[in-house]
Amino acid sequence: MIEVVNPGMHAVIVDRGRFGYSAIGVPVSSALDQFAYKILNRLTGSDESAAVVEVIGAYFSVRFQVDTTFAITGARVAATLDNQNIRPWTAVNASRGSVLKVTNITEGFRYYVGFAGGIDIEPIMGSRTTNLECRFGGYQGRALKAGDKLRPAGSPVANPGMVPEHFIPRMHPPHRLRMVAGPEADFFTDDSMKRFVEKRLKTVYTVSVNSNRAGIRLEGDPLIFKDSRDKSIVSEGVMPGTVQIPGDGMPIVILYERTIGGYARVATVVRADQDALAHLKPADDAWFEMIGLEEAEALWKEKSDKMEELNHYLRRSA
């Protein structure tokens, strides 16, 4: 078993998501940084849907009661194993009795800790990820606490690998979020839309403390509705990355804990930039840039190619 000594500020078990239940209001609830999540599973010899721990805050610590392999991806952190520095984005073999400690976060916001084979927990509705609002999945449907014990599902990795520096994404502010127009983009005055989307004007927003896994609230220059009656619309389905504008004009970027929304959808953050949303922390600056569908598709292909290149590198070095 692996004993949680300190869960940091907030730690939950996540996986690639709970799909197929949005029609009944059950969201995906997946790991927010999918790139970090997928590479973590590759490093620990786990399958693509393995359960891992998503953490906010320093001082996360576990004690290993079994030999295993672990890795940390996502936000760049300073960490030690038995007081010896270890490199994030690198698989490390740990012996029974060893203690892993995260002492600081140097870039980004959320980081992921995974163990050989993933975490052995019974799936609910096809997933091991935690749904905090409905209180199911993960570890008893809640955030981890000191004293909780996790069971790695696999054996230690024979040849631990590491991710080269140039593959690790940039995660520091200001965050550029590229987006494509949403179905209610014409609800807003031309002047406020120009300030919102034009790169040369670069309206900068600040991430609010009232942000969580459901969505990121931004503070700054509000968008102005042409007609006050459009401040609330009939609730419809929303996808991760949807940028909604409530009555106060301040953008909310939807994440992975919502299935419907009743605010105007001005835009959607492109898929290639959605992993970066995991690393927008309170007080960070962010700005939006509107692009076309062709450019959005090209960005996703570029990111997918990079993932495949990294997977090939890790397979070769195993």
Image (cartoon, helix red, strand yellow):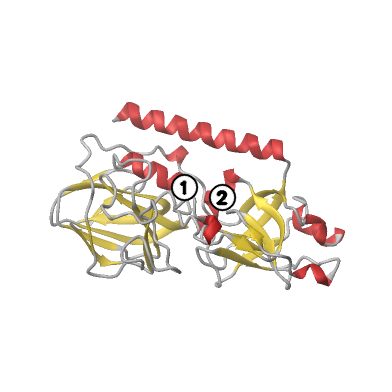
The amino acid beneath tag 1 is: Gln
- Foreground residue among 186 and 96: 186
- Residue 140 falls in which quadrant of the image? bottom left
Residue 266 as seen in the image, left or right of residue 128: right
Q: Is residue 105 above or below residue 176?
A: below
Residue drawn at x 36%, y 64% is 11
Is disc 1 surrounded by few (<14), some (14 to 19) or many (20+) residues within 10 Å?
some
In the rendered image, residue 7, in percent from the top left (x then y), is placed at 32, 66
CB atoms of marks 1 and 2 within 8 Å: yes
Tell me the residue that label 2 is attached to: 274
Mark 1–mark 2 Cα distance, whole angstroms, equals 9 Å
The amino acid beneath tag 2 is: Gln
In the rendered image, residue 188, in percent from the top left (x then y), is placed at 82, 62
In the rendered image, residue 133, in percent from the top left (x then y), is placed at 45, 69
- Foreground residue among 131 and 9: 131
Tell me how many marks there are.
Answer: 2
Residue drawn at x 30%, y 42% is 46
Residue at the top extreme of this rendering: 316
Residue drawn at x 56%, y 63% is 215
The quadrant in which the C terminus is found is top left
